[in-house]
Image: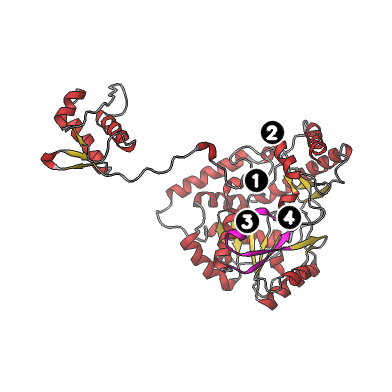
Amino acid sequence: MDTFLQIGIDRASRASLSEQIRNGIGQAIRERRLQAGARLPSWGDLAAQLGVARGTVREAYQRLADDQLVVAAGSAGTFVSEQPPAGPKVDKGLEQTPLSDMFPDFSTAPSVFQGGVPALDAFPYKLWSSIMLRAGRVAAAAPTSYPDPRGEPGLRHEIAAYLAVARGFTCAPSQIIVTNGYAGALGLAIHVLGLKDQSVWMEDPGFPLTLRALEMAQMKPRAVRVDADGLDVSHGIQIAPDAALAIVTAGQQAPLGVTLSLARRRALLAWAERSGAWIIEDDYLSELQLRGRAAPALASYDGTGRVIYAGSFSKTITPALRLGFLVVPPKEAARFGEVAGCLAPAPASGVQQAVAEFMRKGHLLRHLRRMKRLYRARQDLLMTMLSDDVSPAAGSPRATGLAVLLPLPDGTKDVEIAMQALQFGLAPVPLSSWHMAPGPFRAGLLLYATNISEKRLGADCRRINDLIARFG
């Protein structure tokens, strides 16, 4: 028996009549209001019911057949086909943003004190927009082909030149692999090295995203303490002498801001050479040293090819680019290039070409010089504000990287303070979330100085102090 269909037809709609019929029947099938095996009306019957031409119905049925929703059986008629089982219902209330404990809200303007983002009000948007437009036109007019998965040759050449000037080490463009930010660089390195089930030295405190990535890769992170000289190499040898990898922020330790001393650098490189281990240098701030001169990259001391250097444009330009890079030892360049080509090719060429021009014309170095002055002034102002009106429960604030660290007594609920601060448009980073091992001096707040307002800074600092007093 033919099924009687109730299909709404809107002759004023932009959708064609056949498309409306197709959508109406298709929705009834997907919602299981039309069961498998049900016989649809003939073209003529449905056309008469709806007041449309037979050809309109025939076209709709043909499209439904293309969608595998119905089966045409010739003179026997058209029948609803067997459908796969309905998927689980999605409860939007249960949707969770990835890495929500580290990044409260993606794709929004940075909050005050938020880490990982450059100054929103000081970026040369007009200049950058014109460069992006030119790069977009060049990329659109380029021959259609697969780009080099290691990254655009022009950008890799500029990165090599920049590292020689700003970070004190020489490499060839062939050693550089352009990636999707630091996360892409870390993921590529982890995959190529293939160190599943092996121990890894991880700075304690250290970047939570790095720790989580190592755990996802089924590696065994070992917490190596950090002191005034940076990563304590002797402690690493003591707790995990057989480690296959060390990940270190040698230039400015994240989050404490100390520089790995020369003696520690030599000890770390000697350990890697002696044990055949690898070192990933996360140079997340590049040359953005606000006090004194930035130390050369650890990779500049590597004479045996054990250091893999990871850089990013997130702090120097903007994290919206999702652009990072690796510099790998010459003997590993081919292997990294192969894996990049198969699993992690470089991002879109237009963005790469824009960054290459930004670097080639000297805009990046000029921008960094301006940002150093601005960030230092804002950090000094933040230090003054906190020192004048610091909570009795807090220790003395001190500069660290692009932030000010406000130590808190052991047991202070710094995570709770950070969560409560979000409702006031403030995003301090809890220090305890960067620690792996239990112990003293684990609580505190990292207040990043890149996006602060002089007019409201006093009120913002008082709000932080109120929260410390409440949850301390």
Residue occupied by mark 1: 101
Residue type marked 2: Gln
- First in sequence: mark 4 or mark 3? 3
Residue occupied by mark 3: 212
Location of residue 1 in the rendering, given as x and y in whole percent from the top left corner: 16, 33
**Residue 206 counted in the magenta span:** yes
Q: Give the numbered dot on residue 435.
A: 4
Q: Of helix, strand and loop, which one carries label 3?
A: helix
Q: CA distance from mark 3 to mark 2?
A: 27 Å
Residue type marked 1: Asp
Classify 408 as above or below 112.
below
Q: Give the numbered dot on residue 423.
A: 2
Instruction: Name which residue lies at 53% across and 41% down.
Output: 95
Q: CA distance from mark 1 to mark 3?
A: 12 Å
Instruction: Name which residue lies at 49% across and 45% down.
Output: 136
Would you call the spot at circle 2 few (<14 residues within 10 Å), some (14-19), or many (20 or more)? few
Q: CA distance from mark 2 to mark 4?
A: 25 Å
In this orientation, does residue 176 appear? no
